[in-house]
Each structure stands twice: as structure tokens, then as C-alpha cells.
Image (cartoon, rainbow, N blue to C red):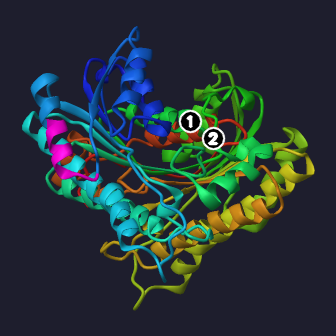
Amino acid sequence: MVSSMDRWVGKVAVVTGASGGIGAAIAEQLVEKGLKVVALARRKERLDELAKKLANKKGKLYPVKTDISKEEDIINAFKWVKENLGPVHILVNNAGIFKMGSTLTDGDTETWRSTFDVNVLGLCIATREAVRDMKANNVDGHIIHINSVGGHSVPPIPGVNVYPASKYAVTALAETLRLELNSQKSRIKITSLSPGAVSTEIVGGVVDKLIKSMEKHKELILDSQDIADAVVYVLSTPPHVQFGITTLNNITMVLSVDRWIGKVAIVTGASSGIGAAIAERLAEHGLRVAALARRKDRLEGLADKVKHTKGKIYPIKADLSKEEDVLNAFKWIKENLGPIHILVNNAGTGGPGSLHDGTTENWRKTFEVNVLGLCVATREAIKDMKSNNVDGHIIHINSVCGHQVFDFPESNVYPASKYAVTALAETLRLELNSLKLKIKVTVMMSPGAVLTEFMPDDFKSTTEFKKMVEEKQILDPEDVADGVVYVLSTPPHVQIQELTIRPVIESF
């Protein structure tokens, strides 16, 4: 996956809610990257000031006064864009309001209505107009919703009223749109970015007090610029790779893997596919990679392949379904390589069969590798990190099946094992947070098809498979490996809790 913003230079991006905070930061970043940015907001004077600030940059900012709660304003804004600048390539739905103080038991109807008018209906209208324009001009564009962690979990803060509901709606709208576009074989991308606490003008009352109380721990608060950097990264991915939902916590976004050079990373299931691609990428970035798998000959071949890179791969034969193998592998690593800094739990398995007449042995093997093996490896890595005061990183390579059960024949207990991984990642994050440990936990989902040995050989010989490859409906293992490098490149106080990577077009 080669990241670049070059294909967007000179193209039109629309950013809503651009007069301050996150929206202004995003607009500024895109102008600096050479885009023609249409900045929509009610406060035209703020937009004019921003345009003046960016007058000598590579791109240009065009202020357009727009109230996102009014459909007529949105439609007029898009009409102006089409007539004066040309086709829309990017839409960033950032506009949002959060009116504190009202409750669901005795709240004000107008407060609720205005929240949904901006956060949901305004977003829907702007998205509809942008997608219409992209389709009419054959533009493979990108829609980005600036969501919130409140769209995934209701915060225990009094007076939030309908705000979390509006953000849950945004989460659903992003996935609904993705499915609609996928059914039409459209290559328009859709991404939902969900930041944690951000110090912006949107907050007030209890939330404002909460953020002020956190100022002595500034690493816990996001800055608007950090979200803008995440938007740029998402836009820089190649046309066939789609980042779906990204949850961001505690960010100052300066991307670098330099602090990991010379450090020890463990990758399980590293003999082929995603695991091999991750191990290779980490070695290329200068890490000492302990590669665990049953097929030692494959690992040795991989080690030989990277022998001229900055890092090194150490092949270790280990069956993740056997606790003794895992314990012996960690013992060897500690004695020969030193403290563990990174663990990538990639090993996974699944066999054919059903729940109504499947074999117990097949079910047991799936849970032994996908769940218990992951738990044992995670436990041993964290024990070592704690004993050596290492602020490390645990990454679980999960699956879309950990969030949704699909109608795939003979999937039996595989989705259950992946749902377990989803829960284990969050349980571990909460445990570490309660202990005030700075060990990070990320669950990476690669829900689209990935070209690995896990894919059945009989399917690879079908016309459908060949079509999927031709149309790039399948991710390469390297795409997932690059996602791992991105997650690891964030600074120590950054936590990318969840990252979704998909092909832009999927067959399911």
C-alpha cells in the first residue's frame, strides 16, 4: 500500500463546519496539500479569515456561507461548487452540534430537533449531493464522516440527551452508504472517523469542565490538528483500499516508527499471508521480529528474504494451540532477544463443518488457536512488558466476523471465536486503563477478502475469484501489514483502538 495525496492535487474537497476547530484544521491541511477546498459554515467572517491565512499555500480555500440545518443552503452551496469549481471529489462531513443540559426525561424538543437536523439530516443531504455529483462525473471520490466515540458507546456524562443517538445514527449511515455503493459496484469510498475527547468550541457545560480538569494530563485530550492528520492519512490510501471505521483516542499525530528500531516484536502465524507480510514490514523498518508458526521451513525462507533489510527475523517453531509451545517461545525470546515491545496476534484457523453436526475436535481447535492461544500470548507479552517497564503495543488481527455473522456455509464456530477476540481486546484495554498502564491495544479488522492461504483452493480456481482479483475486490496481505505499521507509527500516547480495512468494492 503506497500512501500518497498526489491524486487529489487540484481537485475539489467540500468541508462542512469549517469555521473553527476540527473543520478549520481539516480545511487548512487539504489546502496545504494542494486541493481546492470549499469551506461551508454559518460564520462567513471566520471562513474569510481562514482563506486569507491560506492565501499563499499550494491550494485555495473558497468560503461559502451555509447553515447545515437548512436543506436549501446545502443545495445552493453544492450548486455554486459545480458551477464555479467543477466536480466534487471529497466531502468531509464535519459539522455537528452538542447542546448540553437537556435530558431525555424533561428535555426541549427544539434542542433535540436541531441536533438531528445538523448531525444527521444535514450530513445525509450533503452526502447525497456529493455522491450524485461524483456519479454524474465518474469520480471515484471519498466521503468522510467525522463521527465520535459517542457513536459507539454512550458516555456516562449527565445532560448528553440525544447527542449519542445522533452519532450512533452516523455510524449506521456510514455502513448503510458503504453497502449501497458496494451494491452498485461504485468505487466511491466511505470512512467514519470517531475521535475521543477533543478540545473544540462544540463542547460546553459539564464536558467543558471535564476537559479543563484533564488539562494537567494534556496527553488525554485530542487536538483538532490531530483529526486533520488522520483525515489526510485516510485520503492517502490507494484507490482499492478502504478504511472503514477508525476510533482515535489521545492523539498528537506525528507518524514515525523510529522508536521501535532495534526493539523486539512477536508475530504469530507468520509463515504465510498476513503474518508473513507483517513480519517482513517490521523487519524492513528495523525491528527484530520473532516469527512464530508451525512451519519452520517457511519462517526460515522469510528470514532469508529480509536478511539485507534494517531488521531481522528470528524463526521460532510454535503451535499456538499448545500452551507449552507458546511459553517456550516467549522464554527463548526473553533469554536471547530481550524485552518484548510489540505483539501481533495474527494466528488463526477455522475448519469446515456446521453447528448442528460438526465435530467437537474442529470446534476445540478453532477456539484453542483463535482465542486461548491469543490469550496466552497476550498474557505472556504483557507480563514481560510490565516487568521491564515497557510501554508496548498489542495488536489483534481480527475479522469482520467478529462484528457480524454472515451467511457463509459451514462457518460453524469461527464467527464466535472472532466475536470473542473483539470482546477480549476491549476487556484488555479496560484492564490496562484501570492499572494506569500505557500499553496500547488495537483490534484490526480485515473484513474484506484477503488473498491468503486461508482462502480455499477450490474457490481460487473459480471465475468469480478471478473477477475479484481483476476488479481489486481482494486485499493483499501487504495492505493489512501497512495498516499495522500505521497503527505502530502513532506516538506513545496515541491509541487507535479499532481500525477497519476493506476493499472499496466487495462481493459480500
Camera-nearest residue between 422 and 132: 132
User: Residue 70: in sight, yes or no?
Assistant: yes
Amino acid identity at mark 2: Ile
Residue type at mark 1 is Asp
Please report the residue visible at 60 percent of the width from the left and 33 percent of the height from the top.
Answer: 253
Q: Residue at x 87, y 46 (%)?
A: 334
Magenta residues span 69-78
Measure how far apart labels 2 and 1 are at the Cα level.
6 Å
Q: Residue at x 14, y 31 (%)?
A: 80
Q: Which mark is residue 226?
A: 1
The relative height of residue 219 versus residue 415 in the rendered view (above or below) is: above
Relative to the observer, which residue lies in front, 358 or 396?
396
> Does the CB distance between marks 2 and 1 fall below 8 Å?
yes
Q: Is residue 44 left or right of residue 156?
A: left
- In the picture, the quarter occupied by the N terminus is top left
Q: Residues within 10 Å of mark 2 (few under 14, many from 20)?
A: many
Nearest the eye: 38 or 141 = 38
Q: Position of residue 13 (x, y in %)?
A: 29, 30
Residue position for label 2: 251
Furthest toward the top, the residue is 56
Prevailing SS of the magenta stretch: helix
Left or right of 487? Residue 324 is right
